[in-house]
Image (spheres, rainbow, N blue to C red):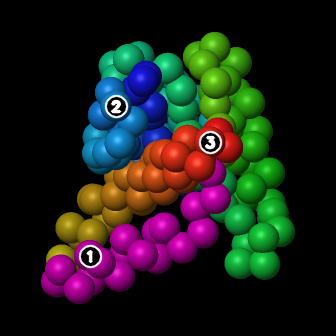
């Protein structure tokens, strides 16, 4: 199974995570400070090449009612640009509550605000990718994927 790159897209920072070769476990791999879409796309292209990724999963910010707002449209544009730049399949994955879940865990771990900022995005990318991997494994198990 190919390595998959997970991306938590943000206006100033991208969180990155990679899967193991078996597609079972997502591991945070870092963050990239970015200014603008071009820099964000370039950062993902570089991360995908370094990881040897054959697929990319980008968190899609969906509203709690399942609708998509302005940020989701921006992410969809980013996904198109990443797909064009890498030539890889790029999927979106519902990221509802991932950042909040990660933030809650970091607060519970008693990390300072500064330390949380340094790890929040890559842990959100890990949560997005792990959710994707788990759902894919479940679909395969059920014979529907």
Q: Residue at x 71, y 65 (%)?
A: 62
Q: Residues within 10 Å of mark 1 (few under 14, many from 20)?
A: some
Considering depth in this image, is 142 or 93 the residue closer to the camera?
Answer: 142
Is there a contact, CB below 8 Å, between mark 2 and mark 1?
A: no
Disc 2 to disc 1, C-alpha distance: 28 Å
For residue 143, the mark is 3
Q: Residue at x 54, y 73 (%)?
A: 97
Q: Is residue 123 visible?
A: yes
The quarter of the picture where the C terminus appears is top right
Relative to 135, residue 46 above or below: above
Q: Residues within 10 Å of mark 2 (few under 14, many from 20)?
A: few
Q: Position of residue 113 (x, y in %)?
A: 27, 76
Q: Position of residue 93 (x, y in %)?
A: 62, 51
Report the side of 73 relative to 104 (left or right): right
Marks 2 and 1, the one that precedes in the sequence: 2
Q: Quadrant of residue 56?
A: top right
Q: Which region is colored magenta?
A: 93-110
Report the side of 5 relative to 84 (left or right): left
Q: Residues within 10 Å of mark 3 (few under 14, many from 20)?
A: few
Disc 2 to disc 3, C-alpha distance: 18 Å
The quarter of the picture where the N terminus appears is top left
Residue placed under numbered mark 2 in the picture: 22
Q: Is residue 18 visible?
A: no
Report the side of 108 relative to 12 (left or right): left
For residue 34, the mark is none
């Amino acid at each position: 199974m190919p390595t998959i790159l997970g991306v938590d897209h943000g206006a100033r920072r991208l969180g990155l995570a990679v899967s193991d070769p078996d597609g079972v476990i997502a591991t945070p791999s870092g963050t990239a400070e970015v200014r603008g879409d071009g820099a964000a796309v370039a950062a993902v292209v570089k991360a995908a090449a370094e990881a040897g990724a054959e697929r990319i999963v980008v968190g899609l910010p969906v509203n709690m009612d399942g609708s998509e707002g302005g940020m989701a449209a921006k992410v969809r544009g980013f996904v198109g640009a990443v797909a064009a730049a890498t030539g890889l399949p790029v999927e979106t994955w519902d990221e509802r509550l991932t950042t909040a879940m990660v933030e809650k865990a970091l607060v519970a771990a008693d990390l300072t605000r500064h330390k949380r900022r340094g790890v929040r995005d890559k842990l959100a990318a890990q949560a997005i990718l792990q959710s994707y991997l788990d759902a894919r494994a479940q679909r395969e198990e059920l014979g529907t994927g």
